[in-house]
Image: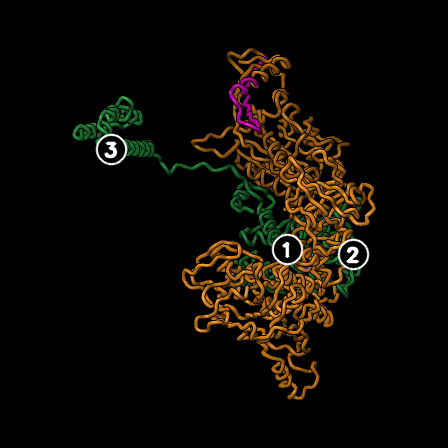
Amino acid sequence: MEEELQQLIEQAEKDIFACSRPNDLLNVKAKYLGKKSLLSSLYAQMRELPAEERPAYGSLINETRKRLEDLIEEQNRVIKENTWKKSELKSAIDLTMPGIFSSRGGLHPLTVIRREIDEVFLGLGFEIAEGPDIDDDFHNFDALNTPLDHPSRNLADTFYLEGGGLLRTHTSTVQVRVMEKYPPPIKIISPGRCYRNDKPDPSHSPVFHQVEALVVDKGISLADMKDMLSQFASIMFGKNVSSRIRPHFFPFTEPSAEMDISCVVCGGTGCRVCKYSGWLEMGGAGMVDPNVFDILGIDSEVYTGYAFGLGIERIAMLKYNIPDMRILYENDLRMLRQFKGELR
Amino acid sequence: MKIALSWLAKYIEIEENTNELEEILTFTGIEVEAVENISALPETVFSAKIISAEAVTETDHLKRCLVDIGNFPYSEKKENGYLQVICGAPNCRSGMMSVIALPGSILPEMTITKAKIKGIESCGMLCSEKELGISDNHSGIIELSSETPIGITANELYELPDTIFELEITPNRPDLLGYIGIARDLSAKLKRSLKMPEINIPDAKCKAETMPLELVNKVPDLCPRYIARLFNKVELKDSPLWLKRALIKSGLRPINNLVDITNYVMLEYGHPLHCFDYDKLTPLPEKPKIPAIVIRRAYQNEPIITLDGKSYVLEGDEMVIADGIKPSAIAGIMGGNISAISETTKRIVLESAAFHPGSIRRTSYKHKISTDSSYRFERHLCAYSAADAAKRATQLICELTNAELCEVTYDSFPFPPKPLILGIRPSRYAQVIGYELEDEKIKDYLERLGLKFLQYGNWKQGKINNIAELYCHHTEEMKQGKTEFTELANCEHTHYYEIPPYRVDLEREIDIIEEIARLDGYHKIPVKTLPQRIMDRHSYRIKKIAVDYLISRGFYETLNYSFSEPNLLYKLGYKDGDRELEMITLKNPQSSNQSVMRTSLIPQLLQNLAYNLNRGEKNIKLLELGKTYHRQDVLSYEPYFLAGILTGLNKEEHWQEKASPLTIFWVKGIVEELLSFLHLENLSVQDIKVPFLSRTESAAYYLADKELAYYGKLTAAAAEKFDIDTIELKQDIWIVQFAMENIINATRTLKTQFQEIPRFPFVTRDISFLIADEIPYCEIVKTIAETDRNIISDVTAFDEYHGKQIPEGKRSLTLRLKLRDKEKTLTDERVDYLIDSVIKKLRETWQIIMR
Ligand SMILES: [Zn+2]
């Protein structure tokens, strides 16, 4: 019997190893382990044996069955792995051929910068306020403590409209409108289009974009403004960029200042971009003039505030090394495509 | 922990109603998990005596009782003025005082009526505690002490109505684990005085020699204090009603006077106690004849059977209270059964101790035993309150068991901790909490919490060992010639307090600051900045979503000047009188082509397109998000639009996945997809109003009368005006526009809501049929969906075919149906039946034939 089984195993091994497809293996399995197999008939003969011989006989058959099952499983694995290998080798691919890209477009660089600024200030707890581009003398000049004979009111500087109104020359108009409507505390930025009667040239455009910040609360000081500027500069331009303010004059702030950041091109050592000063001018700033508060009915003894304005075009040109502001308004796809990767 | 209002009111006056008190507790930092109101009972529920109780034949448990209701006026009295009541309670017996509810009484869960039970009349009901709504106990009828007079109402017996608060005590506040602790916190919060129980201990009548005891504390680190008081001639019996009802309402079962006293004091002081049978304590071998209590660690594999009959094998780490030989209790967790109080007990040892919380926690965890006692000891009970609890229990034992107190009190307290002194700076309070509080208020709150005010002074960093040291600290500076406090250097005004030992959680200045803030109320903390209110975040977000969507479809963003020239609109086909031509004119324009404010974004986009076509670009998709300007009142209305212009291929060219020219469905898809992202549904499709798009290849989407968007093909004529020759170009030019202000307003209240994920899989079926060209697809989809809205979850066009084998004026359309039943897996039969109904309905409605 033992010998018979040994022969069975040897024969089965040959058959099993010869299988190269799953179906062949199923047939072999039926042949050796199925109902009509030799093993099954041997098993059936067990009943005829004396009771004391049955355990040994039975375990011998079971061992054989186990051995065959293992062999089949092993071969099954071999067949599977061979199939995988084949499918991998089937086609020789030229991996240097181009992959499939999405057909995504891109934002205008000024939007990229504006969104970046929005994000910085939203993260610092500011709200974003918008207002009309077409506004009046009160919001653009009077409320901002700008005297009637101030040169900025000239036709040469400001666009006036038939039927009344003007195109705002700064987004400070939004600050005025917010202060009219909401009592302090106020912490806003107002991004938007501004208009000045400048002929287009490399650094001027009759339409341009500004972001102004306004913070009004009890206990707001120039130190808070300086602090905010340095935060903004480092987030926007990098940790190593420092900022400073210089005394200046604006009708609506007192004290007034101009703010600079250390040159992002040369790092402050001096270069063509910063005109060898090491500093880049960023915009105007200052403490809201008490007169402005008085005009708007905010108690200037209780509240103080600061404001500053940034030119979005200027920041974009600095950041992306764009030499001429006019390029930004040509909407040339060859320019726009360059900013496709600036995801905001 | 359950707290009954009636019991709490013994320690502090409560004027508030239940809701107010719940709010006060919550804002004191004691979370109220549940409030249960026990309502008052009718006057017809009162104490009554069972005169006789005889078994009703043919039943195994009913008894016919005659009940004495005294002088209570009731017409149905029988047999010598008694009432006949049938009762099924196992404990019902003659001579017993219980509570009866007369017919007509409305109880919490039933109304009592006169009834006939087994043919016998029953006038009223003898009640269990559960039936009166005062506890969950329904094991039998109420058993009052035999001294209770007849006719005392249940309201009086049980102090009803009452309210039970279930409180969640945070682990840092073990001092709140009893009524007095809660009352103390409330007294500080409500600024009302705390009424501590008056304790009078009678003279000790039992001589020390009568009850000698050997107390050995081998583990003072695990058991910092152990007080043992001894009592002789203890009479075990039922507790008086006031004690029983107090326990019942706090969720404990009365057992006997001694056990009830220890439970009562535990609930009152938050400090668990234990009693041993003195006569069952074995002496130490070296000191025979003197019963012993030995506090020690268990021996390895030392067995103990606890009160509840369970056996444990201790591992050696556990702390036990043993006698001279074997453990009598697992310390602080549960007593053993050998030394337990039994009916024969005459002499007892009362234990009041403090245990190391970590040791109790480990043992409780290891052997999975959790008791009211372990719950409290795990939370660090203080050694001083052990003495208070012992005194209170002593008083009650003497009063209620007629026991004689032994003259010796054993007290193992080897290292009494020094009282902690802490300084608190009002300035620091303002710095941390955010507002200032006056000295007097701070002092009042803290004194009510039991902190002892010592003095005002200057701030001293670090530990303060005693008050003298504090004086030293100040006099150092005084020596330098400064006599007034305010002259002291680095003067920081400070209060100094001695911390009561039961406030184990107060260890630093900041802990005290929290106490003051909590009691003054977190609602007093000022909010500095107003909530954000200026920004229109929705508008900001929708504009961003819309632009980003078009970018994802391949558009590049442009920015054009806000001014333009009127001529461009004429070129597009606008005529005088059109709203678009009502433009705001600049007084001082730089040039004629910048002379007006734009009313449409399209002309400049067309210019951008022409510009880029002229520079050799073929596949162009441009967008602009911008304002248009219209005169309104004295100033302007400046709505945002998002417009796009596109021509060429639908995607980037690729060697493998070929791009193809833009089709109207590609363009339509842009508009519809964005609108669907924004959940803009039930839109009507109408003809466009602009003059520059093909009439047949365009459409506008409206929500009510508001135009949200349109798309369409630019007419060749309009293109030509912008110097674009479409014939030469061989490409169509498409335009899309979104009216952002209308979209923003229409989406303000819409939001995505989660829908339950279907538990059963979809079945997909495709059906193809021939339909006349003039029958619109959307109508067919509607017809199909109406067949069975519960099952047909989606219908989409899968294929459309014109051409060979298809008759003129018809098309072959293949639709894919997604079917799903929310309740079960669809069977093939069900699906087939449904498809048949769909086909039938299509045939009947549209005369459509299957292919
Ligand atoms: Zn530089």
Label 2: chain letter: A
Q: According to the image, label 2 marks what residue?
A: A142
Label 3: chain letter: A
Please state if B743 lies on the left or on the right of A4 as rendered: right
Q: Is residue B673 above or below residue B87?
A: above
Answer with the quarter of the image where residue B795 lies.
top right
- Helix, strand or loop under label 1: loop
Please state if B634 lies on the left or on the right of B623 as rendered: right
Q: According to the image, label 1 marks what residue?
A: B254
Is B247 part of what is drawn in magenta?
Answer: no
Q: Could you tell me if residue B754 is visible in this image? A: yes
Residue B178 screen position, x and y as percent: 64, 61
Discs 2/3, front: 3
Discs 1/3, front: 1
Q: According to the image, label 3 marks what residue?
A: A55
- Helix, strand or loop under label 3: helix
Q: Nearer the viewer, residue B1 or B281?
A: B281
Chain for colour green: A
